[in-house]
């Protein structure tokens, strides 16, 4: 290894992976999704082919990043809980797939800087605004971090709704589960004069979750049932 090569590797962000490695892993992921699920992706063309973008996804299962990456023709940097870093199989896979590991339950400034860096480099950054997997399948309250990143960098958000990744137990009944992914159109959060307050960021995060919710079946609407129902114009009683 030459000195210049070693220097480039030291300067390379920890989440960076080569396009060839990513493409190889993406093929593996696509095969896994096709084997385990009746897998359908709608609207993949809505992801801009270049430039910074935040992909906002609801969180149901460990396979959610697989469901997003398998059919989107763009290299994506994914956020994952730091606990997976020490997992021999999952941790190695996530590292080579290009992942930013986040410490849950605290403000992880190192991860935040990595996210800002990824967007400044024109990357596609996938974030689950809820932070943790939903135990019921219904949407949980989104956290304001995603809104902070979008406002700070003036980056477009692509909402992605996933349904079915959590249903692997259907195989116990000899049924192949359906996994459907719907990719919405990019949108920008409203411009805020000065530094946005925590309440403003939370309101924006809620709006992002509603964008995801309108693309999901009613059973997935969770804490946003009333707002999603109002958004698509149906009586709230149906969403209860």
Image (spheres, grey):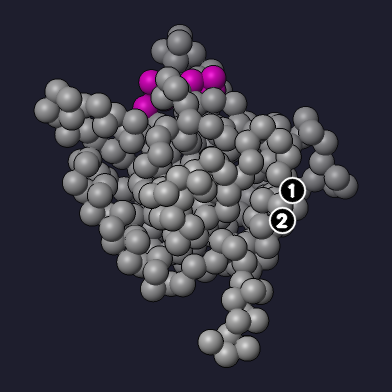
Image location (x, y in percent) of residue 190: 71, 45
Q: Residues within 10 Å of mark 2 (few under 14, many from 20)?
A: few
Q: Residue at position x 75%, y 53% from top?
A: 152
- Does residue 46 show up? no
Residues at marks 1 and 2, CA–CA distance in whole angstroms: 6 Å
Question: Which label number is shown at residue 101?
Answer: none
Name the residue that disc number 2 marks. 113
Residue 11, by quadrant, is: bottom right
Q: Secondary structure at mark 2?
A: helix
Image location (x, y in percent) of residue 109: 74, 48
Q: Residue at position x 48%, y 20% from top?
A: 222
Q: Residue at position x 25%, y 26% from top?
A: 169
Image location (x, y in percent) of residue 15: 56, 61
229 up-or-down from 189: above or below: above
Image location (x, y in percent) of residue 166: 34, 31
Please give left or right for residue 11 compared with residue 64 in the image.
right
Name the residue that disc number 1 marks. 109
Looking at the image, the residue that sits furthest to the right is 194
For this rendering, which residue is in front, 11 or 216? 11
Quadrant containing the C terminus is top left
> CB of mark 1 within 8 Å of CB of mark 2?
yes
For this rendering, which residue is in front, 97 or 120? 97
Residue 154, by quadrant, is: bottom right
Q: Residue at position x 28%, y 54% from top?
A: 30
Magenta stretch contains residue 14: no
Looking at the image, the residue that sits furthest to the left is 174
For this rendering, which residue is in front, 189 or 83? 83
Which residue range is magenta in the image? 217-224
Please give left or right for residue 128 compared with residue 60 in the image.
right
Q: Main secondary structure of the magenta part?
A: helix
């Amino acid at each position: 290894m030459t000195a210049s090569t070693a220097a480039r590797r030291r300067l390379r962000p920890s989440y960076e992976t080569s396009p060839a490695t990513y493409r190889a892993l993406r093929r593996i992921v696509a095969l896994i999704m096709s084997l385990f699920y009746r897998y359908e992706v709608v609207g993949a063309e809505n992801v801009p082919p270049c430039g910074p973008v935040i992909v906002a996804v609801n969180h149901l299962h460990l396979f959610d990043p697989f469901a997003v990456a398998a059919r989107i023709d763009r290299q994506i940097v994914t956020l994952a809980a730091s606990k997976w870093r020490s997992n021999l199989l999952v941790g190695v896979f996530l590292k080579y797939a290009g992942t930013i590991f986040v410490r849950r339950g605290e403000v992880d400034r190192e991860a935040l800087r990595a996210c800002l860096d990824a967007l400044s480099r024109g990357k596609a950054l996938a974030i689950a605004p809820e932070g943790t997997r939903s135990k019921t399948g219904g949407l949980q309250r989104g956290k304001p971090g995603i809104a902070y990143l979008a406002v700070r960098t003036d980056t477009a958000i692509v909402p992605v709704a996933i349904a079915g990744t959590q249903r692997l137990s259907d195989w116990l009944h000899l049924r192949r589960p359906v996994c459907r992914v719907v990719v919405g159109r990019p949108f920008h959060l409203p411009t805020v004069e000065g530094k946005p307050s925590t309440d403003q960021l939370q309101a924006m995060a809620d709006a992002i979750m509603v964008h995801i919710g309108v693309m999901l079946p009613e059973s997935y609407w969770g804490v946003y049932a009333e707002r999603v129902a109002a958004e698509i114009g149906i009586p709230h009683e149906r969403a209860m």
